[in-house]
Image (spheres, helix red, strand yellow):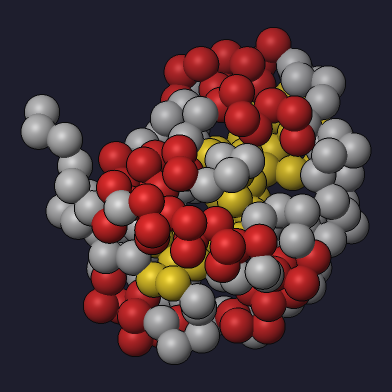
């Protein structure tokens, strides 16, 4: 496959990207499901900015996303065998797995809860984006104002939140499917589907 050529190949832009994130910046991007917004999880001001941009209820946590599972594991603990099975089967993919958070995950990302959702999107542009970010993990949610439909195209994301974020990326041909991820709570060895999305729940209920 021909290498994906984007602005992320430019060293000057990657420098700008990381400086923006370190200075409490928020970015918007395509994933495999719907468009998202994100910031560095250890930047409280940036997380608060996401809630402000969206008008998001503070009781609704953000999730953590990266290009590789290994980058997310330090943010969770007490990972059950069932959770490991789900990650092995569906990462990268349209599944968010909620587990007990570790001390590395700030409470302001989880709305004070002791759990956090993690996901590895199966989208070439998103994976390239994360590989260029120092730390390679983003605290994220969908790129739309609260109570509005999720953005499924660059144009929809631009019209919804484009004027509020610091950087919004085109998808460079790596479009999204248009349906949110399935969300599964995986504590101990119990599994509970909290949101039905791209992946059907038959496997989780076995």
Instruction: Residue 64 in the image: state x and y as whole percent.
Output: 63, 46
Foreground residue, 192 or 178? 178
The residue sitting at the top extreme is 81
User: Is residue 113 shown left or right of residue 57?
Assistant: right
Instruction: Residue 85 in the image: state x and y as whole percent.
Output: 57, 14
| Above or below: residue 74 compared with residue 198 | above
Is residue 202 visible in the rendered image? The answer is no
User: Is residue 122 shown left or right of residue 117?
Assistant: left
User: Is residue 194 shown left or right of residue 12?
Assistant: right
Of the 4 image quadrants, the one containing the N terminus is top left
Which residue lies at the image location 83% right of the left edge and 61% below the top edge? 108
User: Is residue 130 shown left or right of residue 126?
Assistant: right
Quarter of the image where one finds residue 109:
bottom right
Which residue lies at the image location 45% right of the left edge and 25% below the top edge? 90
Quarter of the image where one finds residue 61:
bottom right
| Above or below: residue 20 compared with residue 119 | below
| Above or below: residue 79 compared with residue 171 | above
Of the 4 image quadrants, the one containing the C terminus is top right
Instruction: Residue 151 in the image: state x and y as whole percent.
Output: 36, 70
Which residue lies at the image location 47% right of the left edge and 63% below the top edge? 16
Quarter of the image where one finds residue 77:
top right
What is the total number of numbered labels drawn onto the structure image?
A: 0
| Above or below: residue 125 compared with residue 82 | below
Is residue 3 visible in the rendered image? The answer is yes
């Amino acid at each position: 496959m021909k290498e994906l050529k984007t602005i992320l190949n430019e060293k000057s832009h990657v420098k700008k990207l990381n400086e923006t994130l370190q200075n409490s910046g928020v970015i918007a991007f395509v994933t495999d499901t719907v468009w998202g917004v994100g910031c560095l999880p250890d930047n409280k001001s940036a997380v608060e900015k996401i809630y402000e941009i969206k008008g998001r209820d503070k009781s609704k946590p953000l999730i953590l996303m990266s290009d590789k599972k290994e980058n997310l594991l330090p943010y969770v603990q007490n990972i059950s065998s069932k959770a490991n099975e789900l990650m092995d089967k569906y990462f990268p993919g349209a599944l968010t797995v909620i587990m007990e958070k570790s001390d590395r995950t700030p409470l302001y990302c989880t709305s004070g809860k002791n759990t956090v959702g993690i996901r590895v999107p199966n989208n070439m542009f998103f994976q390239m984006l994360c590989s260029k970010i120092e730390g390679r993990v983003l605290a994220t949610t969908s790129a739309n104002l609260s109570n509005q439909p999720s953005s499924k195209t660059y144009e929809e994301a631009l019209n919804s939140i484009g004027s509020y974020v610091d950087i919004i990326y085109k998808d460079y041909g790596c479009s999204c499917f248009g349906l949110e991820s399935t969300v599964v709570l995986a504590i101990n060895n119990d599994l509970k589907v909290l949101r039905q999305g791209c992946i059907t729940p038959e496997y989780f209920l076995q």
